[in-house]
Amino acid sequence: MTRVILVCNMSSTPANPLSPGSPPGGAQASPSGSNPAKPGTLNVNPYKPGTPSLNQGSQGRGQGGDVLAELVHSQRQISQQNQELTDLRIRLSRRSHQMSVLQHVAEILAATPKVLQVASVLQDVFVQEFNAKTCVVWILDDGGAGYQPKVGHGMPRSVWSKLQLPAPNPFPNAPTVLFQHQWLDASTLRGPLEVLKGVGDSGAFFVPFEHQLLLMGFAIMALDSSHHMEEDQEILTVLQRQVAVSIYNAWLFRDLGEQRDALRLKTGELEMANAALMEADRFKSEFLALTSHELRTPLTGILGFTRLVMDGLYEDEDEMHRMLADSYASGLHLLDLLNDILDLAKIEAGRMQMHLEPWSLHVLIEEIKPIALAYPRKPGTDLIWPEGLAELPEVLVDPGRLRQVMLNLLSNAIKFTKEGSVQVNVERGFGQMTIQVIDTGIGVALDAQSRLFQKFVQAEGGHAREYGGTGLGLVICKRLMEMMGGSINLHSEGVGEGTTMTLMVPIA
């Protein structure tokens, strides 16, 4: 408030208003020579410095209004800056949360080599961070022929699991930019894909996962149309790269795993083949030593008996005949050994020929009876033959080769049976005849049965074996039966339990 000070002249002599030097109207002149005050203007004690006037009050009020306006403007600026700061804090908080989510997702994706888990993590991000109403994630299959749905949200599994899409363009009838995330036109999602649009005011958003210009997979989620995807551009871009690389790495990991398994399998096969080769080499070495012994024994007998006859070292003609008979038997044995070796060589060279024709088993058995009865056998070993073979149908075989197989089996059965019997059975089956040679001999150990049809292998090894042979007989029998369209099997309960050899031949 402006204070007004009134200064009065206390002299007893009244002032003469018209006294010389006095201004008209009784007002005193301004000492500074300024203009007289305007009517209605109070100018009290003009000679005292610092005393405001009414003009000065109006000027002060004008300056106060300017200050007040500046204060209001400053207040508005401060409020605007506070709002901007609040918005920045919100954006920073959201960005920090997004970075935390991306880091967490990156850790999970880096730790898993499975495509299904990658798709599951991605779906959780879309549902929790983007509030997706529906969401389905597709991954390119191994052959690259199409995209298979891996996980789905907001709809039954029976619905989204049937949404297979072609490759390389899952939407061949729509102008879709495959390598950029975008809102999909309503015309893109037709037929079964309409379920991806969601319900209400929502739209379908497409998120591709591209790596090296190959669409590894994609996701389609239904979002509110008011959702501002511009705010999520960065997190989507980073997420797309992470997922695409994870899917590609999962492919590489699976391929490496398959190659590792294949290499491991091949390594095991090579180890087994190497072991088999080493065993075959051992058997071959044993076979050569054995064969030289087997061949030398009858040849020595032939030469020895022949020399005795040539030198006349026999008492009478009967003894000479016995020597010649022994020499002949040794020659036959030597011929059998050589025939086995030559037959195996022909079979392996592919030069063995078969002449299949219908043949009666009755005739075949009658032909081999006298030969088998002539084989040397232990006392008390009986040969038992089947009956009623004339009523059985004919079989389609090479008669000479089937005879060879039967004689080989009978020879082995008689040779390995010290007492008991050797029995031949014939039965009719479905489209084939079964011929069995059953003996009560020494049997075969269980661990040796699977090797008896290999070359140079016998039930007993070593050079000091009680029984002779080259170990080629069963190998030749197996090859001959296979070439005739039949089969051969061995069964034994173990050592000392006898052996059953079974032949299967087709009916003519």
Image: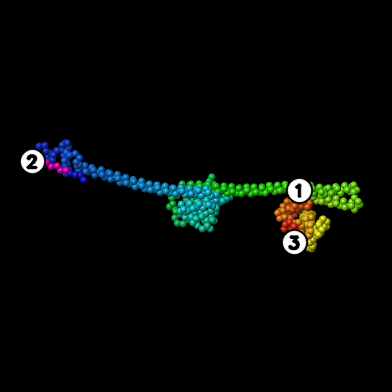
Q: Secondary structure at mark 3?
A: strand
Amino acid type at image mark 1:
Phe
**470 and 250: which one is in front?**
470
Q: Position of residue 65 (x, y in %)?
A: 26, 45
Residue 262: mark: none
Whether residue 303 is visible here, answered yes or no, is yes
Judge the density around disc 1: few (<14), some (14-19), many (≥20) Cα neighbours within 10 Å: many
Magenta residues span: 5-11
Q: Quadrant of the N terminus?
A: top left
**Mark 1–mark 3 contact, CB under 8 Å?**
no
Q: CA distance from mark 1 to mark 3?
A: 38 Å
Mark 3 highlights which residue? 428
Amino acid type at image mark 3:
Arg
Whether residue 178 is visible here, answered yes or no, is no
Q: Secondary structure at mark 1?
A: helix
Mark 1 highlights which residue? 287
Amino acid type at image mark 2:
Thr
Q: Position of residue 2 (x, y in %)?
A: 20, 44
Judge the density around disc 2: few (<14), some (14-19), many (≥20) Cα neighbours within 10 Å: few
Q: Is residue 397 left or right of residue 220?
A: right
Residue 13: mark: 2
Front label number (3 vs 2): 2
Residue drawn at 78 percent across, 51 percent down: 468
Residue drawn at 9 percent across, 37 percent down: 20
